[in-house]
Image: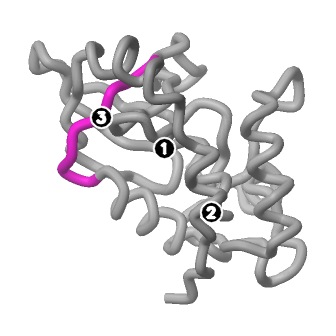
Amino acid sequence: MAVAAVGTAAVERCRIPDAVARSTWTARPTWTVRTVHDGDTVTCVDPQGGRHKIRLLGIDAPEAAQAWGRESSEALSRKVAGGRVAVVSRGYDQHGRLLGTLWIDDRDINREMVAEGHAWVFGRIAPDPDLVEAESAARRERRGLWAAGLPKEPSDWRAAHPRQP
């Protein structure tokens, strides 16, 4: 596995201030991660026992058969598999998946995936500026999937490799 080293400064920018973490995120109920499907989708169980497939909001990770797909999935697994996360949801996508940001303590997992070069920013209209900054830094410092040059965005890869019925 070819994982590029990530500086602590990049990960530190994925953290929220201590006061905010204590007052907001620590009081939020946590969900148990049951399955990591790929670098931007997990299945979690909420505190009431309900299962939810969650698409990480604002990011798009390489597909499994795409370059860096396995590494991206493994990176998310190392962060969350079998663990407990707080989920901040923003509705559902066209496939019925909950759109959300995953938090572990004061760590924004979605942003970490982008900052470490395991995913792109997803959303052409008003993308999250923190995610845009994280992707710019990952590109500039050639982290993760950016180490090999200009990788193909997942949306372009999917268009070139449509699923067969």
Q: Position of residue 160 (x, y in %)?
A: 81, 61
The residue carrying mark 2 is 116
Determine which quarter of the picture holds residue 57: top right
Binning the other alpha carbons within 10 Å of mark 1 as few (below 14), some (14 to 19) or many (20 upward) gives many
Report the side of 25 relative to 98 (left or right).
left
The residue carrying mark 3 is 85
Report the side of 129 relative to 99 (left or right).
right
* Mark 1 or mark 3: whose residue is earlier in sequence: 3
- The residue at the point 88 percent across, 31 percent down is 124
Residues under numbered marks 1 and 3 in contact, where contact means CB atoms less than 8 Å apart: yes
User: Please, what is the three-letter code of the amino acid marked with disc 2?
Assistant: Glu
Binning the other alpha carbons within 10 Å of mark 3 as few (below 14), some (14 to 19) or many (20 upward) gives many
- The residue at the point 50 percent across, 38 percent down is 108
Task: Report the magenta residues as a range.
Answer: 81-88
User: Please, what is the three-letter code of the amino acid marked with disc 3?
Assistant: Val
The residue carrying mark 1 is 109
Report the side of 29 relative to 147 (left or right).
left
Question: Disc 2 on helix, strand or loop?
Answer: loop
* Mark 3 or mark 2: whose residue is earlier in sequence: 3
Q: CA distance from mark 1 to mark 3?
A: 9 Å
- The residue at the point 81 percent across, 72 percent down is 141
Residues under numbered marks 3 and 2 in contact, where contact means CB atoms less than 8 Å apart: no
Is 34 colored magenta in this rendering?
A: no
Q: CA distance from mark 2 to mark 1?
A: 10 Å
User: Please, what is the three-letter code of the amino acid marked with disc 1?
Assistant: Ile
